[in-house]
Amino acid sequence: MATKRRMGPENAATGSLLMDAVEAVMREQGYAALSARSVAARAGLKYQIVFYYFATMDDLLLATYRRRTENVLARTEEALRSARPLHALWEASSDPFDASLSLEYMAMSNHNAVIRAETIAFGERIRQLVADRLQGKLEDASPDPTTFTPMGVAVSVFLMGGIFGFEQALGLSGGHRDVETIVAWGLRQFEPEDASAEGTPAEAG
């Protein structure tokens, strides 16, 4: 659905404060608790201010989500520039702090058409970006390039990392040390340098 023009200054600090408040409410209470009143209260403002900076709640949610995807993209680009990009991607995708918020956005996308469309577009974009950047590296290092495609490896890291991070945030840890050992072994098949380097999933001790 078409969104209305933003009413407040584009780069106002208050607008950023409201976006911070959106994510704080999502982390603390879940996306279902989002409203102009709950966001404004979390930001320490009157709820009417929300509609000075954003004409609708969807505008505020979309702006907040796009800010987040820009940060995810920046972290992904940084990981891809590292000496061991797969290890760095696992480190970023399995972050429990980010994983819990990602899950809230995924749940929101199931009920909000604006966020769903943005989630699909960004998800396809970043997966293709990672696959393209890994193409040459994985062809040289892969045990079987026809089976372990760059897209397959990239999506596996994203999906496993996201679930792993969410379980950590939830407090579910059964089998995690075993999974870390398996992931470390798998990543070394593609990036066989020093397995103790920074960014490597922790080995079971």
Image (cartoon, helix red, strand yellow):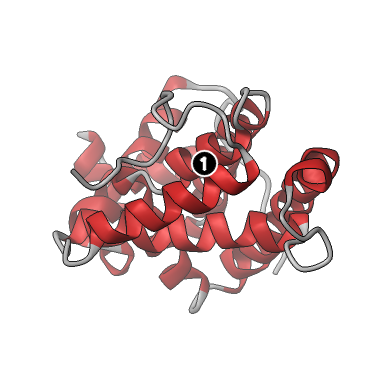
Depicted 119 relative to depicted 201: above or below: below
Q: Quadrant of residue 16?
A: top left
Between 166 and 56, which is closer to the camera in this rendering? 166
Question: Where the N terminus falls, by quadrant?
Answer: bottom right
Residue 104 falls left or right of residue 9 = left
Depicted 146 relative to depicted 51: above or below: below
Question: Where the C terminus falls, by quadrant?
Answer: top left
- Residue 127 screen position, x and y as percent: 71, 54
User: Is residue 85 among what the camera can see?
Assistant: yes
Density class for disc 1 (Cα within 10 Å; few <14, some 14-19, many ≥20) is some
> What residue lies at 17% left-to-right and 61% top-to-bottom?
173
Q: Residue furthest bottom?
A: 111
> What residue lies at 66% left-to-right and 57% top-to-bottom?
153
> What residue lies at 42% left-to-right and 35% top-to-bottom?
200
User: Is residue 45 among what the camera can see?
Assistant: no
Depicted 31 relative to depicted 28: above or below: below
- Residue 186 screen position, x and y as percent: 52, 53
Residue 50 falls left or right of residue 45 = right
Amino acid carrying label 1: it is Arg
Between 144 and 40, which is closer to the camera in this rendering? 144
- Residue 42 screen position, x and y as percent: 21, 42
Between 79 and 70, which is closer to the camera in this rendering? 79
Residue 42 falls left or right of residue 114 = left
Q: Which residue is mark 1?
A: 68
> What residue lies at 44% left-to-right and 32% top-to-bottom?
195
- Residue 155 screen position, x and y as percent: 63, 61
Q: Secondary structure at mark 1?
A: helix
Q: Quadrant of residue 170?
A: bottom left
